[in-house]
Amino acid sequence: MQIRIGLSVTLLALVFNCWSLTAYAQSDNYKVQVTPYGFLTGVNGTIGEAGRTANVDASFGDVLDHLNMVAMVYADARFGRWRATLDNLYTDVSAARATPGPLFSSVRVATRLWIADPEGGYAVFQREGKEVDVVAGVRVWSLKNNLTFFRDGLQADFSRGTRSVVDPIVGMHFSSNLPHNMFVFAKGDVGGFNAGAALDWQAFGGVGHKFNEHVVASLGYRYLSIQNEPGNSIYDVHLNGAILGLGFRF
């Protein structure tokens, strides 16, 4: 049963940490950056609770139409070559859209998703405005899904599930200065390893602009995926879309 729902504007996130502690920033030994951001994501995959599943295929417009609440912020603290980061994302989305299936005529899906991603990292390369970091940490997914199935306008079934998934994560990110106060950045990580989810990974990249010593803006694209199937539940979802953020450095 195919449903187009708003699920999680997640994300994303992180973007824009402006991980480019670029040449301008490297003159300061210590730096903190706080970045409210937006993850303009579409959602596709499979969500299931208590043995009932729904195949999700939602554009960013679908997500936005049914968004109840969203909060996204990224924090990055740096001392010398060491860094500590925290990505925090919360979404509350509900909708009711479906194509007819063999058993049900529609599905109403309500999802609350919170992602917290604390990581530590170390710069293994710094030279002429370029930087490569290795990072490790955990990504915590806290999920609450309500699936209400209808047949000819009447409720025929209801499934609910709440759980948390804690995935170890390892990855790398790269940044490089460009002329005119511009920079580029990219990050990839992978985790899960059946410690929490079977697989949990993301990749993103983009460009940014440094307005002054305290304000930076970034624009990019992010893909975030998790495959988690505990018992008779399933959360096999891919989030992808544009990311944009405005960072404040202290």
Image (cartoon, rainbow, N blue to C red):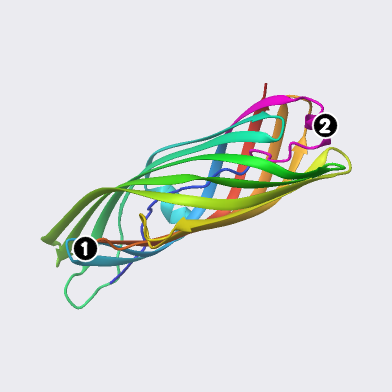
Image location (x, y in percent) of residue 23? 83, 35
Q: Measuring 53% from the left and 40% from the top, which residue is drawn there?
A: 119
Distance of label 1 from label 2 (alpha carbons): 51 Å
Q: Disc 1 marks which residue? A: 231
| Quadrant in which the N terminus appears | bottom left
Three-letter amino acid code at disc 1? Gly
Q: Quadrant of residue 75?
A: top right
Identify the residue at the far top of this view.
Answer: 250
**Sequence order check: which comes first, mark 1 or mark 2?**
2
Q: Nearer the viewer, residue 231 or 95?
A: 231
Q: Is residue 34 a member of the stretch shown in magenta?
A: yes
Q: Residues within 10 Å of mark 2 (few under 14, many from 20)?
A: some
Q: Measuring 16% from the left and 74% from the top, which residue is drawn there?
A: 103
Q: Nearer the viewer, residue 182 or 173?
A: 173
Q: Secondary structure at mark 1?
A: loop
Three-letter amino acid code at disc 2? Tyr
Magenta-colored span: 16-35
Q: Disc 2 marks which residue? A: 24
Image location (x, y in percent) of residue 246? 64, 34
Image location (x, y in percent) of residue 185? 71, 48
